[in-house]
Image (cartoon, helix red, strand yellow):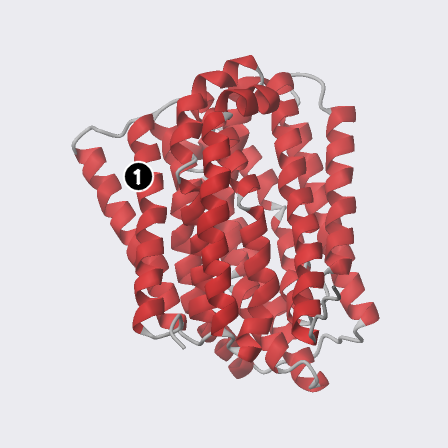
Amino acid sequence: MKISLNTDSKIILKNLSYLTVLKVLNIGIKIVLAGYLIRILGELNYGIITWVDSVVQYFIMIINFGFNIYAAKYIVEHKNQDTKINEIISSIFYIKGILFISSIFCILFLGQFNEFSSYKNLLLLFMFCGIGEVLFPIWFFQGVENLKPATIIVFFSRLFLLISTILFVKATTHVEVYVFLLVISSILMGLLGFWYVFKYYNIKLIKVSFESIKNYFKESLPFFLGRFLSLVFNFGTIFFIGKFCEFEQVAGFDISLKIIMLAVIPFEMLQQAVFPTISRTKDKKLLRKLILMAVILGTILGAIIFLMSEKLLYLLGGETIILFSSTLKLLSLLSPFVALTFILGTCSLVAFGYYREYNFSLIFTSIIYILILFSLYYLHQITFLNLIYLRVFGDVLMVVIRLYFSVKKRVLII
């Protein structure tokens, strides 16, 4: 039996293939590196690296400023307008460059506080990963629906990081060596992406009026606020575990969460691949199929992780990390909810133009999370287990809110 694919299906399939490879490389190499670093640097030093990274990720989010979601839509809408594309790209690079410089000054200021003073050099070194974030235009590759070059670039940059780490990180004292290699890898990825876009798409950096830059800034601000607050769930949890618990527990949580993120890669990739097409076609039937798939496959993957938690942790982190099997079992409940979060977010609300509702889901959930966190603090109940419970609760609440808006706005109803 012959299966014929229409143009949209072929585009989705091609982008999904490249996005899946890209994400698997990114997360997969991170997991391999985590296993290697825990064994070489030790749980304590790995926990410190993860904790410092959780702080820097807030500034990385500031640099990206919501463009990784919203800028792809700009490119889709103006794909055949060269002058407009040059204006969009130039504005985004200018904004991200200014935000990176501002973030460096913020890190220097943050290093003056007692909580961060011991790690100020590591924080500053980590922050230079932001150069790669400024330069690498993943949003452009998504917008033109051509993710092959992005996949190749990410592959070589991550391969460089993996090989160089194995070659040069050999002792517990090589923490800064690893971070330096991570920065070089990020900058390499950014430079290659920047070079490719300007060489093969005939893009030009042009002078853009302050008014245009301000408009792009304002339009992306709601997405930035939502995404920034949503970091609380992942990196905020890591930060508070490191602050109120132990760095070894940071390592256990990070490895467990990486396993969950690896399991939901197909759904993250699916929503990124399908997003431009659904934005263009408003295909509700396709959206409902994606949601059903997320529920079924997400539940199956979560069950597999639950049953194999000890074996997975031993494989990735060694014998001492097996102590966190109960943490991984608890986080396995997230699998179907994270899958639904991806689909109900960009493919449902953003693709159909409900930006305010999308951002509300992020902001409201984050506010509830923070309020509960403050309550735990004042009640002296901030424990490792309570932080994990709170992390799971946050994702469940976000799915409920996004599902509510998707039904209320009749996005899921033909």
Q: Residue at x 75, y 49 (%)?
A: 188
Q: Residue at x 64, y 80 (%)?
A: 87
Q: Residues within 10 Å of mark 1 (few under 14, many from 20)?
A: some
**Relative to 309, is 94 above or below?**
below
Q: How many marks?
A: 1
Q: Nearer the viewer, residue 233 or 324?
A: 324
Residue 308 makes an appearance in the image: yes
| Residue at the outermost front position | 1
Left or right: where 178 falls relative to 356: right
The image quarter containing residue 374 is top left
Tell me the amino acid under the disc marked 1: Leu
Image position, residue 364 (x, y; %): 29, 58
Image position, residue 3 (x, y; %): 72, 66
Q: Quadrant of the N terminus?
A: bottom right
Q: Nearer the viewer, residue 279 or 158?
A: 279
Image position, residue 66 (x, y; %): 50, 63
Left or right: where 68 falls relative to 110: right
The image quarter containing residue 148 is bottom right
| Residue at the outermost right position | 199
Q: Residue at x 48, y 35 (%)?
A: 257
Q: Nearer the viewer, residue 316 or 56?
A: 316
**Relative to 345, is 304 above or below?**
above
Image position, residue 123 (x, y; %): 54, 38
Q: Quadrant of the C terminus?
A: bottom left
| Residue at the outermost top position | 319
The image quarter containing residue 139 is bottom right
Tell me the element at label 1. Answer: helix
Residue 106 makes an appearance in the image: no
Q: Which residue is mark 1?
A: 390
